Image (cartoon, grey):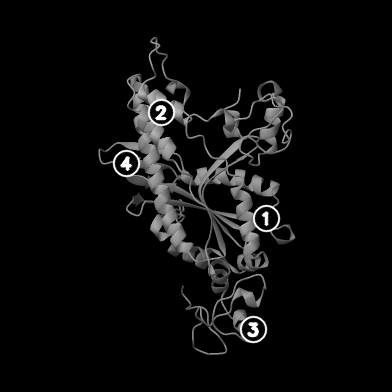
Amino acid sequence: MKWGDCRSRAFPGRLCCPAAAPTVSSLSSSAVGVSGIHDRAFRRKNWRHCSSRAKAEFAENQGDQKMLIKHADDKTKRLALLEELQRSNLLDKRQREWLKDEHFRTLQGLQGERDAAHYIDSWLKDGVNHAVLHDLRISFDGEIAQIDHLVISRALRFYLFETKCFNGHLQINAQGEFTVRYGSGKAFGIASPLEQSRRHERVLAKLLERLDITGRAGMKPSFQHVVLLHPKAIISRPDAKAFDTSDIIKADQIASWHERYVDERLGIGATLGLLANFHGSETLKGWAEKLARQHRPQDQLALPDFMTPKVQASTAAPAPHTAALLAMEPSPADCPPATDNSHPLKRKLICVSCNSKISFAEGKFCWNNEGRFGGLQYCREHQAQVG
């Protein structure tokens, strides 16, 4: 942490440091202090003479224990399915190519998200001012947001990290268009990960409002979007005046990016708002746990329609890959009968299959299709398994 712009009048000419600088605990009993000067009055005096950047860094970074609320989902069942299907002799050319590409994309995505999670966890280790949720998939009014990594600060600032793992050369032009060029010379246009993350923000903001996750005096949460690339990625950027790519970084640069973010973008007004909206670590943990309960895992056995296996004319025993698929199918116990109208959770916003909370839209869909769901309600994952 740089302290060149934070001087104390109590010690003219000397720089404040984390051990002798004021802590937010001197202003708010809900914050967590650090070791150093124990005279609260002296710390208040020092605090008044710290720069806005120093205050913002304290508000974002103090703490002494980590709050990792959600790990990434286990994708081993998905990988096993893709690997097993590739051994089938019933596939046509299109199905084989899709399975090969999907297996590669899944492995690549898992590695990229795993690496990014490592850098995020290292950045925020031993901290109580940020809660971390990896691989969060939420739903609101039929819209889905798959957030690779979500970091929440005690000032109700949400950092949405979108992970991209490219083997090629990433090029970004002045219009914000993304292209990946590989060694063979082939170039492929890709969707903007920044715009993808902003779409996630819209779903997240609606969900936060419904969950009543708001700041003091009704202050709304703020959002920051960051794209994380592999540390060895090659990036060609446009002129910053044409298109700002400062939030597109290599995953190992997270800590330095955040320092620049606080230094260059949080002015006095933003800092005062951040401090006014500062909450206790228990409140932060409650927010994160409430969001974690809204996680809607993706069906690992889902396949596109064109991947439906061909019907065998023979009545012989199923092939090995078919047996593997059957073994992965959910048991009837996982999906209660749709005709069970006496269920105690009937017409409640709780999935009767997994007991997780669901949105009103999910419940309404089930209730409007009583013939299929028997008057009960399911989350999106289990809706597909009923009827």
Which is closer to the viewer, label 1 or label 3?
3
Q: Is residue 370 above or below residue 248?
A: above
Using the numbered discs, state the Cα–Cα distance from disc 1 to disc 3 in whole angstroms. 31 Å
User: Where in the figure is residue 355, as x and y percent of width and height?
Assistant: 64, 40
Q: Residue beneath label 3, please? A: 40
Using the numbered discs, state the Cα–Cα distance from disc 4 to disc 1 in whole angstroms. 40 Å
Residue 231 visible here: yes
State which tag comes first along the sequence, 1 or 3. 3
Q: Residue beneath label 1, please? A: 220
Kind of residue at badge 1: Lys
Using the numbered discs, state the Cα–Cα distance from disc 2 to disc 1 in whole angstroms. 49 Å
User: Where in the figure is residue 363, as x and y percent of width and height?
Assistant: 69, 33
Kind of residue at badge 2: Ala
State which tag comes first along the sequence, 2 or 4. 4
Q: Residue beneath label 4, please? A: 181
Using the numbered discs, state the Cα–Cα distance from disc 2 to disc 4 in whole angstroms. 38 Å
Do the residues under discs 4 and 1 have CB atoms within 8 angstroms?
Answer: no
Kind of residue at badge 4: Arg
Q: Foreground: 105 or 164?
A: 105
Which is closer to the viewer, label 4 or label 3?
3
Q: Secondary structure at mark 2?
A: helix
Do the residues under discs 2 and 1 have CB atoms within 8 angstroms?
Answer: no
- In the shown orientation, is residue 360 left or right of residue 243? right
- In the shown orientation, is residue 33 left or right of residue 366? left
Q: Secondary structure at mark 1?
A: loop
Q: Is residue 95 above or below residue 40?
A: above
Using the numbered discs, state the Cα–Cα distance from disc 3 to disc 2 in whole angstroms. 65 Å
Which is closer to the viewer, label 2 or label 4?
2
Residue 156 visible here: no
Q: Foreground: 55 or 307?
A: 307
Q: Secondary structure at mark 4?
A: strand
